[in-house]
Image (tube, rainbow, N blue to C red):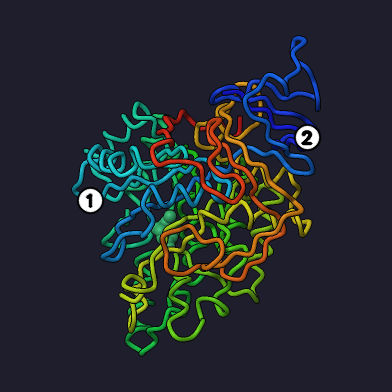
């Protein structure tokens, strides 16, 4: 099957150009001046399908490097399966996800990884890879980490938060970072001081402060700044790179920037919720509506300019990527487990469908360039997580993961209108997006076009990732 995408503006992280894109099978084979012939062939007359992208951007498919399909949390499971979650991703122009396989204390890493393969295999609409969550750092899991690259898994996440669940102490973290340094793995860190947060949360509940809002009060920014600093220091001692997930506080960005200025290989992502949503307005919403916005780290106070600092970090490369931390839970039967005690609300929000649109609003408002949008959402995730050359770029030899994005289009996000995630609400209800995902190709197959899903569960392949190539 040969496809020609004509008349559009091809946007890579390195620049934009008016060009036609020739796709053969699963790969991009040529990016040509508009209307070009190839070795004398009239391309348009010799392909199976032409996609007219006149007036539109032709960008590499999005890579969401932080999702949690079916994550067990707080006595329940994230409500998107790999089937529903990757279909929603496709709707939003995301053609690869990297999800987190889970190992808990006492479990073998191999078994945790195998369980995630079983959940995903044959179910995904777009390609998928795995990071490994290490919830129990011990001799066996440290040894297993050294074998992960052979499985195509080259990054793992540890938690300074959630004592008794995924938490690791400083000694465990240091040892795992030493293994990472020796074996070319990229450690990822949930940087919040869990034990101290638990004390504050217990005190708040004892005072009768049980609403979702107090989730944000307990997880005050000092807990994120302190843990971020500690993780950076531990990585420095271990001589390991470090990737901080879901950064929400401006003080944490400052720690990351300072480390990078000192020359440390510290990288970080933020998420759409920390660019747009606020502690008072959303987490503080009445009638338990705030539960929809319970995630960790929490939404920050909008009066403290955290959001401005996130955008600034994205512009200046103190922050390198935007991922969603997609971890959806329904209000009914899931979030409501925490009625009367915010500590029992499962942590997480559903965003995988909207990341490309939401970050594009930064282009519309002049906060970032078009190229930076592509870099933050696609090119850097590919490089950071060992997919450079295959994903994150429109160039000969790359997978034909392509989004035709209409800057003149419009998307009204709403549960009744645009919602494809398996959650009973949208945390993004009412967001009006300048721009629209028109057509999505996943390895050369059209999965979204004309407002319809044309993909299938099982099209998505497992991505065996190599070592990080960021920065080259
Ligand atoms: O609230 C969140 N972030 N839920 C998912 C688990 C995690 O910490 O990433
Ligand atoms: Zn986390
Ligand atoms: Zn997460």
Choose top left, top right, bottom left or bottom right for residue 262.
top right
Q: Give the residue displayed 74% in from the left and 53% down from the top.
A: 363
Q: From the top left corner, tell me how far across and down residue 122 is, in percent.
A: 34, 38
Choose top left, top right, bottom left or bottom right for residue 45.
top right
Choose top left, top right, bottom left or bottom right for residue 266.
top right
Q: From the top left corner, tell me how far across and down residue 83 is, in percent.
A: 39, 48
- Structural crowding at the residue carrying mark 1, measured as other residues with C-alpha within 10 Å and reported as few (<14), some (14–19) or many (≥20): some
Say if residue 379 shows up in the picture.
no
Quadrant where the N terminus sits is top right
Question: In the rendered view, does 442 fall on the left or right side of 335?
Answer: right
Please, which residue is most extreme toward the top here? Answer: 39
The answer to whether the residue bearing label 1 lies less than 8 angstroms from the nearest atom of ligand 1 is no
Q: Tell me if residue 11 comes above or below residue 32 in the rendering.
A: below
Q: Tell me if residue 463 comes above or below residue 368 in the rendering.
A: above
Ligand 1 falls in which quarter? bottom left
Q: From the top left corner, tell me how far across and down residue 56 is, in percent.
A: 75, 43
Question: In the rendered view, does 301 fall on the left or right side of 78?
Answer: right
Q: Give the residue displayed 33% in from the left and 70% down from the top.
A: 334
* 213 and 265: which is toward the camera: 213
User: Is label 2 or label 1 in front?
Assistant: 2
Q: Tell me if residue 127 comes above or below residue 293 in the rendering.
A: above
Say if residue 434 shows up in the picture.
yes
Determine which of the numbered discs, if any, sits on residue 7 in the image. 2
Nearer-N-terminus badge (2/1): 2
Q: From the top left corner, tell me how far across and down residue 398 is, in percent.
A: 59, 26
Question: In the rendered view, does 423 fall on the left or right side of 247?
Answer: left
Determine which of the numbered discs, if any, sits on residue 105 in the image. 1
Q: Give the residue displayed 43% in from the left and 39% down from the top.
A: 128
Quadrant where the C terminus sits is top right
């Amino acid at each position: 099957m040969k496809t020609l995408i004509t008349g559009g503006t091809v946007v890579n992280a390195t620049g934009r150009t008016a060009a036609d894109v020739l796709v053969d099978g699963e790969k991009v084979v040529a990016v040509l001046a508009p209307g070009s012939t190839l070795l004398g062939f009239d391309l348009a007359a010799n392909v199976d399908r032409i996609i007219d992208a006149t007036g539109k951007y032709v960008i590499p498919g999005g890579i969401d490097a932080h999702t949690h399909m079916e994550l067990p949390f707080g006595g329940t499971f994230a409500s998107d399966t790999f089937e529903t979650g990757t279909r929603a991703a496709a709707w939003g122009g995301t053609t690869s996800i990297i999800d987190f396989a889970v190992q808990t204390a006492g479990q073998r890493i191999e078994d945790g990884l195998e369980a995630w393969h079983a959940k995903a295999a044959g179910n995904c609409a777009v390609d998928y890879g795995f990071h490994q969550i290490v919830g129990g750092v011990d001799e066996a899991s440290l040894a297993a980490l050294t074998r992960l690259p052979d499985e195509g898994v080259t990054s793992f996440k540890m938690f300074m938060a959630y004592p008794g669940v995924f938490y690791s102490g400083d000694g465990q973290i240091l040892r795992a970072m030493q293994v990472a340094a020796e074996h070319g793995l990229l450690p990822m860190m949930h940087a919040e001081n869990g034990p101290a947060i638990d004390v504050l949360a217990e005190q708040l509940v004892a005072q009768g402060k049980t609403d979702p809002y107090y989730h944000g009060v307990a997880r005050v920014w000092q807990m994120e700044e302190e843990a971020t600093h500690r993780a950076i220091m531990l990585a420095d001692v271990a001589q390991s790179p470090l990737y901080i997930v879901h950064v929400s506080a401006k003080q944490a960005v400052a720690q990351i920037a300072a480390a990078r200025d000192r020359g440390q290989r510290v990288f970080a992502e933020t998420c759409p919720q920390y660019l747009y949503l606020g502690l008072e307005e959303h987490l503080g919403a009445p009638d338990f509506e705030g539960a929809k916005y319970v995630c960790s780290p929490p939404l920050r106070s909008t009066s403290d300019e955290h959001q401005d600092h996130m955008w600034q970090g994205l512009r200046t490369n103190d922050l390198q990527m935007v991922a969603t931390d997609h971890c959806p839970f329904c209000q009914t039967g899931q979030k409501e487990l925490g009625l009367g005690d915010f500590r029992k609300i499962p942590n997480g929000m559903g965003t995988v469908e909207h990341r490309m649109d939401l970050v594009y609003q930064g282009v519309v408002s002049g906060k970032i360039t078009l190229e930076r949008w592509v870099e933050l959402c696609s090119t850097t995730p590919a490089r950071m997580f060992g997919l450079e050359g295959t994903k994150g770029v429109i160039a000969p030899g790359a997978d034909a993961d392509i989004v035709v994005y209409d800057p003149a289009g419009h998307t009204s996000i709403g549960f009744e209108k645009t919602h494809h995630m398996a959650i009973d609400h949208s945390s993004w209800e009412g967001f009006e997006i300048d721009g629209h995902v028109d057509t999505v190709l996943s390895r050369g197959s059209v999965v979204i076009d004309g407002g319809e899903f044309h993909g299938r569960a099982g099209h998505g392949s497992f991505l065996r990732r190599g070592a990080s190539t960021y920065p080259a």
